[in-house]
Amino acid sequence: MWKESWEDTGGKVKKWEGYWSLLASINKAIESGIPITDPSFYASEIACPDSIIESIFEPADGCIETIPLLKERIRILREVGRTLVEVCIDLLLINKSDHSD
């Protein structure tokens, strides 16, 4: 459950399902100061322990359904984060060497 709409500031609550619940969870994390869209953050088990990711995707009050395969999803999220960080570093190094003439 979360806001009635993305523009809602009155605190109305609506149950989001499927993809929309993912967006609501990510938006809620960002508003709470959790940098969940930063690959270097979610790739790190130290900066972002499983418990933080689990709390982001915990069921809303009154909901008995949990996110399926959460441990596997966390493993994949970390793998994607590490890959993105490595690719960005490689691109920065390539870009730097191209301009070092």
Image: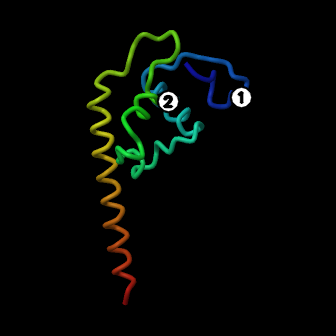
* Contact check, label 2 and label 1, Cβ < 8 Å: no
Q: Is residue 38 left or right of residue 45?
A: right
* Cα distance in 3D space between marks 2 and 1: 16 Å
For disc 2, the neighbor class at 10 Å (few under 14, some 14 to 19, many from 20) is many
- Which residue type carries mark 1? Thr
Q: 40 or 9, which lies in front?
A: 40
What residue is pinned by disc 2?
A: 25
What residue is pinned by disc 1?
A: 9
Mark 2 or mark 1, earlier in chain: 1
Q: For the C terminus, which image quadrant?
A: bottom left
Locate residue 98: give its quadrant: bottom left
Q: Position of residue 77 (x, y in %)?
A: 33, 40
Q: For the N terminus, which image quadrant?
A: top right
Query: In the structure shown, which secondary structural element does the residue marked by tag 1 occupy?
Result: loop
Q: Is residue 2 left or right of residue 100?
A: right
Q: Residue at 36% across / 35% down in the picture?
A: 50
Q: Position of residue 47 (x, y in %)?
A: 42, 46
Q: 96 or 20, which lies in front?
A: 96
Query: In the structure shown, which secondary structural element does the residue marked by tag 2 occupy?
Result: helix
Q: Residue at 41% across / 42% down in the picture?
A: 48
> Please, is residue 8 above or below residue 13 in the view?
below
Q: Position of residue 91 (x, y in %)?
A: 34, 67
> Please, is residue 46 above or below residue 15 in the view?
below
Q: 55 or 3, which lies in front?
A: 55
- Which residue type carries mark 2? Ser
Coloration mode: rainbow
> Please, is residue 88 above or below residue 74 in the view?
below
Q: Residue at 37% across / 70% down in the picture?
A: 92
Q: Position of residue 25 (x, y in %)?
A: 50, 30
